[in-house]
Image: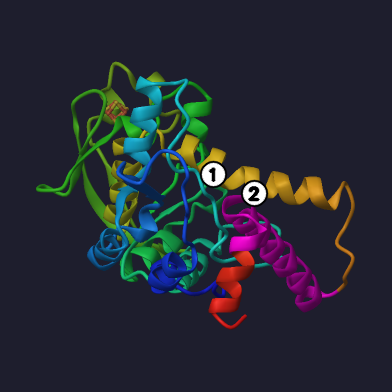
Amino acid sequence: MTAANVNDGKRLDQVLQAIVIKRKCPPLRRNKHLCADAGYRSAENLRIIDEHGYIAHVVDRKREADAKRRHPNRKARRWVVEVAHSWFTNEGHDRNQLAPMAIAAREAMGKAKLQAVADRGYYSGTQIKDCDDAGIAPMLPKPATSNAKAEGRFGKADFIYIARDDEYRCPAGQRAIYRFTREENGLQIRRYWSSACPQCPIKKQCTPSDYRRISRWEHEPVLDAAQRRLDMHPNAMTVRRRTVEHVFGTFKHWMGSTHFLMRTLPNVGTEMSLHVIAYNLKRLIGILGIARTIKAMRLLGA
Ligand code: SF4
């Protein structure tokens, strides 16, 4: 067992030395298999697994999901969830948490790159940009906040941005060209509209104003890239729900429908961290069993 902020693969060699699986059946001449999550996919870890005489099964979640779809009754070869990093905040929303937590999680896992999947409560343009600057690829759905869409008119997604010309193609096929940039809440927002709006035959479906104005943040390409990643991984939110939310469901089940026992942010954060350690420890015991967990802890001097 290592601390929560140590890369999974760092102690793989010691763990495999400690965990000698003596099999009576099937006989030794049959191959031994080792299932691990994508955190063990480095060439070094695969070499260690191979040296210990195992056939590695290190699959990414997409391949696992595909396999499950093909054989729904077959148990997944790997299904382990660990809490790599936890935090506690008294902010009433998650919109400022995406970048700091993704960066902290990446450091905890010892990764150079990371794909961060979050729910729409974390959506923030500046946070997505901070992730992008840090080399982290975030993937999260955009909250539906468009009044126009809610009122049955065209939403922003109905306007196609033409990067080459820096203009939008509107649903009527007209060009909405760049007009000016202004600062809104510290962000540089570019404005576009078409001169054809007053004569447009479908104007009622578009805007109650004289012109339909389209806003574009100066760093909007990073938001477009996040949306493209999500479009390319249509299962991402399902995988996030079933891997992450059950951890919190488990915590709530353990704690009951009660409040934290501690008071003040540092103390509550400590209480939460203890729950996380307990969760990881119980998972470890569930996977290895008590004897092998103790053996591994002793080997590592814990
Ligand atoms: S109102 Fe303007 S922006 Fe909207 S569809 Fe018509 S021309 Fe295009």
- For residue 278, the mark is none
Tell me if I can see residue 186 in this picture: no
- For residue 243, the mark is 1
| Label 1 residue SS | helix
Residue 199 location (% of width, % of height): 26, 23
Tell me if I can see residue 182 in this picture: yes
Asked whether 282 falls inside the magenta stretch, the response is: yes
Q: Residue at left 36%, top 53%?
A: 38
| Label 2 residue SS | helix
Compare residues 93 and 216 and report the one nearer the observer: 93
Q: Is mark 1 within 8 Å of ligand 1?
A: no
Is disc 1 in contact with disc 2, using a CB cutoff of under 8 Å?
yes
Ligand 1 located in image quadrant: top left
Q: Amino acid at mark 1?
A: Thr
- For residue 247, the mark is 2
Asked whether 79 falls inside the magenta stretch, the response is: no
**Residue 236 found in image quarter:** top left
Q: Residue at left 88%, top 46%?
A: 257
> Given the current orientation, which residue lies at the most extreme bottom position?
301
Q: How is the image coloured?
A: rainbow
